Amino acid sequence: MCGIAGVVAFDPATRVDAARLTRMRDVLTHRGPDGCGNWIEGPVGLAHRRLAIIDVAGGQQPMASEDDRIWGVFNGEIYNHMALRPTLEARGHRYRTRTDTETILHLYEELGDRAVEELHGMFAVALWDRAERRLWLARDRLGIKPLYYACTDRELLFASEIKAILAGGFPAAFNVAVLPEYLATRFVAGEETFFRGIRKLPPGHTLSWSVTDGFARRRYWQVPDPAPDAGADFAAEAADLRDRLSGSVRRHLMSDVPLGMFLSGGVDSTALAGMAAGMIPEPLQTFSVGFAEAEANELPYARRAAARLGAVHRDVVVSPAEFFGELPRLIWHEDEPIAFTSSVPLYFVSRLASDHVKVVLTGEGSDELFLGYNRYRVTHWNARLGRPYWALMPARGRGAVRQLIRRLPRGVRRYAERTFLSLDPGERSLFFDNFSVFSTGMQATLLAVGSVAGRDPYATALECYQDAAGSDLDRMIRADLHTYLHELLMKQDQMSMAASLESRVPFLDDEIIDHVAAMPARLKLRGWKTKAVLRAAVRDFVPAEILNRKKMGFPVPVGRWLRGPFAFALDEFVQGERALARGLFDADEVRRMVAEHRAGQAEHGERLWLLLNLEIWQRIFLEDGQPAEIGAGLQRAGRVVHAGPLGEGGRAVAAQYRRAAADVPHAVGAGTSAPGLAGDHARARR
């Protein structure tokens, strides 16, 4: 795993500034502490930070083709690079290393843009063709590896992380238009980011620029449509899937350095660990994370699975103070507000693992492929049961039912409001708004920014859903693979790379994706049972108590903490004067949510989490705030609350936070101006 960056000036008379390129490169040190390199030729500069995994001694980048015509930088792993090599050698290409990077260069020499279609793995690539004066960027099918870019009237900048583009001098400005989508879905799908003018290269796409032809973008892959259901036998499909998964795990074990496994105690990671354990000569190393709170602790299941495998197991328990103390720095690593609370414990387990291995396998992607989330079955059954109700019950009658539901006790009402009795027909209501954090109705009272009025928070996801073929379940899968999964993969990449650890996702192997996407939905969801065919395929690798237990989904008790020891954080970052003065949200609505949450009258933990993250992100990236200061202030003020002299939350503890933050020395780097932050951290803990 690595970090890449680069600059291409549109004026051929320009020369890239070496110091500037180095700043872009070295803000990514956490992605590649094992080596670095620059290549500059006039208006073009390529930069690379290396985490050495394959051919540790010989894989330095930027790397050139044998005739120096093509220069490139690469982040990721190409699992079929050894299979491609004999054909390329037969075509006359001379290899100087054992790396997959060199295979990409030679393949591009042979096939040009079509080279990307032969690559199986996870990747973000940038190649410069000296003869054609052409830049070529490419990203893997599902966007496992990140790639961002920005254009001015003079140049194109690109990098693995947004902070590198900012380090290159691109101005940081809040793209306020994304607020509705962030509030509804937790993240921003499509090409936009939280930074005005900085875009993602979409998964499954290439982008090129040349002096003669300008810009051109091409989509080379999309999720296959479901195949016609020919009545496939369930047991036979499960057996076939088991063989395919076994092959994927074997491919993902490719490494010249120590490798391990994230083990959550759920079906997905336990199955992969069981397969991997039988393929390596030494005991598998497994790593887990949990919390002291029983409702958020899966460690007992992970420990049992590891014991059954004979694995060398390690785990870490994260305290609330550690969680909030690291949060600002992890927002810096993620570049955008952290969508999922699980990102923080993911960093802690990555840090633990990186002290023992350099590569881990994870179970990401299984839920999206095999209909593992509760929202799939709820949406499906709401649609099925709702069709006769919507058809037979007149609008006035449906309105009366909704009125009755509003009078129910809070606990019962909360569930009834998620059913077809309260919802309108159609995917917007049943699938998107029903499972949003802030529904469109809630946003109407919360948002105070006129410029985002009328912005549809589900536009990108709805387009993916409506463009897909097949049943409602098939369409939900495709919408999530193109939107929700992408954010999960960015979380996985950024939190593991914050600890200089490469993470791999065997469920998202190209062969698995093509096969499972075409599989009939009835094999995945059988009645109320999720991931049915996967459970059958891996039952020999997963203990029964794990195979059949209720999904927890990496829970984090942040709602409890924001009601208890870290309630003061809401006074500083959500309803504090500085936060409300931004004018993004209606102050009365914000205060109402905070008051309801603290009093236990409503559960607004997820909603307050998004507002808190957004405020910290603005202080770091738009106001050059120091993550170390903010985190230390949170941690120290949290200890004061535990000690008790200032009570729980309120202005006094928020003031204590500000005093604690002010006591932290400014010498620790932060924001986009301090590339040493992550590297200093990695060295300190070793």
Image (cartoon, rainbow, N blue to C red):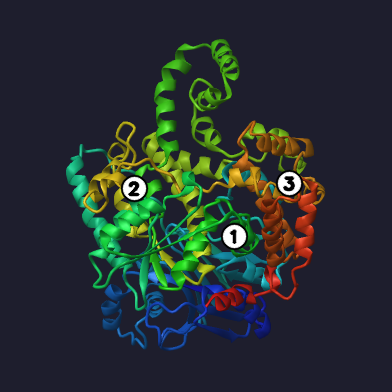
- Which residue bears the numbered disc 1? 322
Q: Can the viewer see residue 617 in this picture?
A: no
Residues marked 1 and 2 touching at CB (< 8 Å) = no
- Which residue bears the numbered disc 3? 647
Find residue 10 and report its horizontal and vertical position in percent.
65, 74
- Identified by mark 1, the residue type is Glu
User: Which of 318/485 is in front?
Assistant: 318
Q: Secondary structure at mark 2?
A: helix
Is the residue marked by circle 2 packed among few (<14), some (14-19), or many (20+) residues within 10 Å? many
- Identified by mark 2, the residue type is Ala
Find residue 381 and report its horizontal and vertical position in percent.
40, 28
Report the side of 300 relative to 40 (left or right).
left
User: Which of 60/422 is in front?
Assistant: 422
- Which residue bears the numbered disc 2? 517
Viewer-nearest of discs 1 and 3: 3
Number of numbered discs visible in the structure rendering: 3
Which numbered disc, 1 or 3, marks the residue that appears first in the sequence? 1
Q: Which mark is residue 390?
A: none
Find residue 672 and report its horizontal and vertical position in percent.
68, 69
Q: Secondary structure at mark 3?
A: loop
- Identified by mark 3, the residue type is Gly
Between marks 1 and 3, how big is the CA–CA gap?
20 Å
Between marks 1 and 2, how big is the CA–CA gap?
40 Å
Is the residue marked by circle 1 packed among few (<14), some (14-19), or many (20+) residues within 10 Å? some
